[in-house]
Image (cartoon, rainbow, N blue to C red):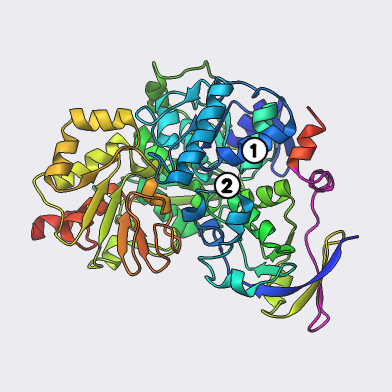
Amino acid sequence: MEQTLTEKILARAAGKKEVSPGELINAKIDMALGNDLTAPVAIREFEKIGVEKVFDRARLALIPDHFVPNKDIQSAALAEILRRFARQQKIVHYYEVGRMGIEHALLPELGLTLPGELIVGADSHTCTYGALGAFATGVGSTDLAAVMATGELWFRVPPTIRIIFHGQLPRWLGGKDLILYTIGQLGVDGARYAALEFCGPVIEKLGMDARLTIANMAIEAGAKAGLIAPDEITLAYLEGRAQRPYTALYGDAGAPVAREFNWDVSDLEPQVALPSSPANTRPVSAVAGTAVDQVVIGSCTNGRIDDLRQAAAILKGRRVHPRVRLIVIPATQAIYLQALQEGLLETFIQAQAAVSTPTCGPCLGGHMGILAAGEVAVATTNRNFTGRMGHRASRVYLAGPAVAAAAAVAGEIMHPAALREVN
Amino acid sequence: MRTFQGKVWVFGDDIDTDAILPARYMNSPDPKELAKHCMEDADPDFMKKMSPGDIIVAGKNFGCGSSREHAPLAIKEAGIACVIAGSFARIFYRNALNIGLPILESPAAAASLAAGSTAEVNLQTGEITDLAGGHKFSAAAFPPFMQELIAQGGLINFVKGKV
């Protein structure tokens, strides 16, 4: 029987010849992840189990990124729990402030998430690593505790939904527009319990940063994972980066899937998700003119170097609108340094943006850019639920870096191509 | 046999974990602290109005969004007896099972139970009774593996038995 990429990976991890959707399996975990909010709860549960050591100190990454640099005394205490446990267990992949980055940007950058692997993380955006051809999924803290103790976890094999993008992606559009369009078509539970597999000529031309953005938001359609089969672009990205040997897996041609969608994106406009759902997507022209108080460019979704380059291309020689605060957050220290060397940070600062050290901060209403009641933000982040970035009467529009940068300059939502006329 | 009655609080579709437990309160991992803010961004007065033993009823995709276990922990610690929904987002579903928060999936019960009414729930059989009209609903049965997980009191006890 032909198998999808998801089924191939789960079968390998479960030590089986093949698996089928709906089957319950116990599988070995190649890499696990926790952060400063979820790992303290996992550590508490891990200690109840009564084993002394984690299953493999090189296969558990502990990344302080959500409320660090510590935003208050309680957050400092959480970071301290993580740090102490990492030292006590001699965790190889613990990264302190100044060396850390947003987990889902940092782990791929370090070559710790590899094709064919099964990866779990106590963070819903763990699905990001599917961009490399891994099966990666978010779990809760108790699931992470079980993995920390045993290196294994149970799964129900998900059905696969295949998304095929055809045509030519227009100028100004990127990975964010493709995934927002997908979520808009499927709805926030359209892929619930399923694995999304993205393919076709448009995906084949995308760089890794755009692919990571797409896989990152699979959870926003309810999916368990979002995968892109490895190709030359993937292998080139991993060259000199992969920290473990790996075996790339591929789905069989003709493997049956639950559903398949074929979309031609040649005429697609940049996409915006309106408050308060990532599935509430419209073409940017439908919301053009919406006044904006704050713009955030960053996060595990869009804080990578290609994202910063797109924003800088629009901000170069321009200024942020007097009514707007623009906050730019490179997702890792390496990205921050590269942006510095490429002159992007100078462009941002000349444009009067605030540039921050890596943190998840504003995306989840933690710190570094909380919204007051009635305020409107355009953000390159992943969720615009009620209260997500601050007061429950604030509103968030999700978009890619080009639309976000254009909004910062114009003071209102605008197609990036229309900026020339006003500035 | 675990049968209980509780007052029904009704929420809509796609209630996300940011609404159940806003991230601004996640600087504490203490369930008692988290419970103070249970459902705050869905209904800011919820904790003032509810009583332990009450039941949350919601539409489809309850618990979507973030993987934060703080969300089901807050519901459990607040004293909510169970959550009945049309469907659950998958990470929330796992988390609820893992920590021992009873959840029941029944689109018919979710659509029918009215705010302020009283429901009777039998967790063993998955039978839900609307005491207002006497209607009975059957929640989807858990697969045998998950029943074993529940019987052992959640994932940590289950793992303890294996290591």
Residue range highlighted in magenta:
B129-154
Q: Identify which amino acid the numbered label 2 is placed on.
A: Pro
Q: Residue furthest right?
A: B1
Mark 1 sits on what residue?
A44
Q: Position of residue A50 (x, y in %)?
A: 74, 29
User: Taking the image as drawn, is residue A1 in sight?
Assistant: no
Subunit bearing disc 2: B
Q: Position of residue B83 (x, y in %)?
A: 70, 63
Looking at this view, is A18 or A367 the one in front? A367
Mark 2 sits on what residue?
B29
Looking at this view, is A281 or B36 the one in front? B36
The total of numbered circles placed on residues is 2
Q: Count residues near mark 2 (Cα–Cα under 10 Å), then give few for <14, some for 14-19, many for 20+.
A: many
Q: Identify which amino acid the numbered label 1 is placed on.
A: Arg
Q: Image quarter for residue B39?
A: bottom right
Q: Position of residue B74 (x, y in %)?
A: 62, 57
